[in-house]
Image (cartoon, rainbow, N blue to C red):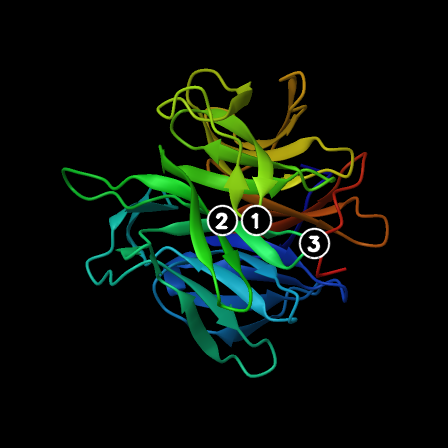
Amino acid sequence: MSDINIIAEGLAFPEGPVFMDDGSIIVCEIAAGRITRVRRDGTTHVIATPGGGPNGAAIGPDGALWVCNNGGFNWATIDGMLIPGAQADDYETGRIERIDLSTGRVERVYQTVNGHNLSGPNDLMFDAAGGFWFSDHAKIRARESDHGGLFYGRSDGSLVKQAVYPLDHPNGVGLSPDGWTVHVALTMQRLILSFEITGEGEVAPSPLAAVPGRVAASFPGRVLLDSLAMFADGDIAQATLVERPGIATVNPATGDVSYRDFPDLLTTNIAFGGADMREAAVCLSTTGRLAMTRFDKPGLRLAFNG
């Protein structure tokens, strides 16, 4: 595709891109359990190797990289594609980690909520106050799976709390530009849910707890959902999988969806950056590639990395 520039190959299932001010992209290589910086000339540098399954990442108010670590998957190679599967044989627990970008030191900040282990933290986004919303996608085993949920944590380590539980394999998380709505993508249900934020780590109750949130958009067939990012105008850039792999632009007020195709069955993540915030780093995960492209409108400038 002429509008896509592949800047790196050979990555071990890249996700969680963080677009840095110097133009480099930090990615989580889930299958290798490491965090890697990719420069525009394609060179790479390993920042840290926390193990498990580093999945989603963001720069926090302390300048450190905050990572959702899902604890790891078992992996299979199918027709040349690297595919994640069930919970890793050496799985310990899911956790939220803080990584010092200058030293590579890894600190586990949260791994339990209300006495229960985190199962498979997946994606996160910081609010302007320095707290972060994150999803727990949960883990799948041979004959069972955990429940997932939406959670909130403070970056000083003093609070982590459950906001919505249970949810069916929540994945991408994003905040509206005004900071008053949190959006969550449910991978297998093919829904983006929106929740009104009413306080620190709190959302407005739903009429039925078993039917949480407002449906901002739904997707047909086997268009499964992965991570998401926000546009500056409040639209959602939703990574889509399998039947229509790529990045969908979603209007959460109307539910309107338009698609932009990318050449990987699991196009999992997107991050915006550059001077005009129209550059985008997109993870082509099964083939281990990181792509750069441009969009016709800017992404939302995040609170703590530019």
- Mark 2: few/some/many CA within 10 Å (<14, 14-19, 20+): many
Question: What's the CA distance linking mark 2 and mark 1?
Answer: 13 Å
Tell me which label, 3 or 1, sits earlier in the chain. 3
Judge depth for marks 2 and 1 and give the one in front: 1
Q: Nearer the viewer, residue 292 or 163?
A: 163
User: Horizontal placement of 164 versus 64: left or right?
Assistant: left
Query: Which image quadrant for residue 208?
Result: top left
Q: Secondary structure at mark 2?
A: strand
Q: In the rendered structure, find residue 1 and report the number of the disc placed on it.
A: none
Q: Which residue is mark 1?
A: 200
Percent x, y for residue 230?
A: 67, 39
Q: Is residue 141 above or below residue 60?
A: above
**Residue nearer the viewer, 172 or 197:** 197
CA–CA distance in space, label 3 to label 1:
12 Å
Q: Residue type at mark 2? A: Phe
Q: Mark 2 = which residue? A: 134
Q: Measure the C-alpha gap from mark 3 to mark 2.
A: 15 Å
